[in-house]
Amino acid sequence: MDVFKKIIKSVSIIALGIAIGFGGSWFYTRYIIKFNLHLDGNLLSEQSFSVRSDISSVAYPFRNWQVREEPSVQAEGVLMVDLDTDFVFYQRQPNFRRPIASITKLMTAVIVQKYLSEEDEITISQRALNVDGDLPLFYLNEKVKIADLIKALLMISSNKAAAALSFYMGEDKFVELMNNLAKELEMTQTTFVEPTGLNFLNQSTPSDLKKLMKYILNEYPNLLLISKNNEDSIQGIIPKTTHRLININLLTQKPVFLEELGLVYLGGKTGFTDEAWQTFCGVFLVPSKKIEEQPKRILVVVLKTPNRYNDIESLLRWLNKAYVF
């Protein structure tokens, strides 16, 4: 009988403990948490994004799921990514190889910076002048500093400048260095056969171009500074003459949409051939809405598109609506 009473007493104590636990949890959830949420309006606004986001976007950045549609772009290959965190905002066939046209000249400029002296002078040969794809700029046998040829290479996409630079080193050796660096950067889907981008066998992927752009930002950021200049001039030494350069990349003219979105174009490269269609690889500085946060360096790559500028604007406008930094 005593044993039975002890069992009844133990069961009663356990039941009372469970009831107190559930009751306390209900009271805390119903009144304490609710009260705190009403006190903190900012917390409520952040939860309105985070509860609809996957776990990666809770930390950075917040995905605004009220914007459910994808960006309207015509490019077959697309990548929009934060270069500092590798957070991908949008991609389309990021690992599919395509001709990249004059985006090639980014690698050409890197090889020149890495292996040649900017102060060296190059004599423009007839062979360089015979290269197609851009308007006449240089004179036969004109001497031009390498630093000025880099400007022509990146601002007006001069194929003649690219050819002259590769001929100076030896074209086979130059192209070998281009492919060696691509291999070093683990650009496994990238090949170069010449330095201009005219050949459709110069191919890469959006993911590989991200690796190249990160390398340029870390090692040769001056190349992007050159590429974003809207206007400049270069000096021929013999004969002494001045060549005016107007950048062919319309993003350097500060289009209205960049100002509307508060974005800064940090530089990059456009391209076009019949096989590649229009191409683009460039970086934008996107401000954070949080005072303590640094602006984000966002890479945009579009390959094989009939209108790169429409695609770039669509991607950046979508980014501005779909994500909260």
Image (tube, helix red, strand yellow):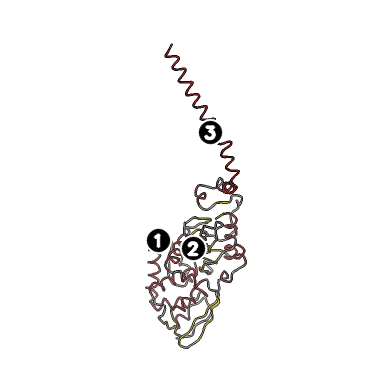
- Residue type at mark 1 is Glu
**In the image, is residue 262 above or below residue 63?**
below
Q: Residue at x 50, y 57 (%)?
A: 93
How many C-alpha atoms fall within 10 Å of the one at disc 3: few (<14), some, or many (≥20)? few
- Residue type at mark 2 is Arg
Q: Residue at x 49, y 85 (%)?
A: 139
Label 3 near label 1: C-beta < 8 Å?
A: no
* Residue placed under numbered mark 2 in the picture: 98
Mark positioned earlier in the residue sequence (1 or 3): 3
Which mark's residue is nearer the viewer, 2 or 1? 1
Work out how far the residue at label 2 is from the one at label 1, CA to CA, in angstroms: 17 Å
Mark positioned earlier in the residue sequence (3 or 2): 3
Q: Secondary structure at mark 2?
A: strand
Closer to the camera in the image, 188 or 148: 148
The image quadrant where one finds the N terminus is top left
| Residue 36, position as x, y percentages in the image | 57, 42
Label 2 near label 3: C-beta < 8 Å?
A: no
Q: Quadrant of residue 110?
A: bottom left
| Residue 224, position as x, y percentages in the image | 48, 69
- Residue type at mark 3 is Ser
Closer to the camera in the image, 39 or 67: 39
| Residue 225, position as x, y percentages in the image | 49, 71
**In the image, is residue 153 above or below residue 39?**
below
Task: Kindly identify which numbered label has been placed on residue 186.
Answer: 1
Q: Residue at x 49, y 63 (%)?
A: 98
Task: Kindly identify which numbered label has been placed on residue 25.
Answer: 3
Task: Kindly identify which numbered label has been placed on residue 16.
Answer: none
How many C-alpha atoms fall within 10 Å of the one at disc 2: few (<14), some, or many (≥20)? many
Mark positioned earlier in the residue sequence (2 or 1): 2
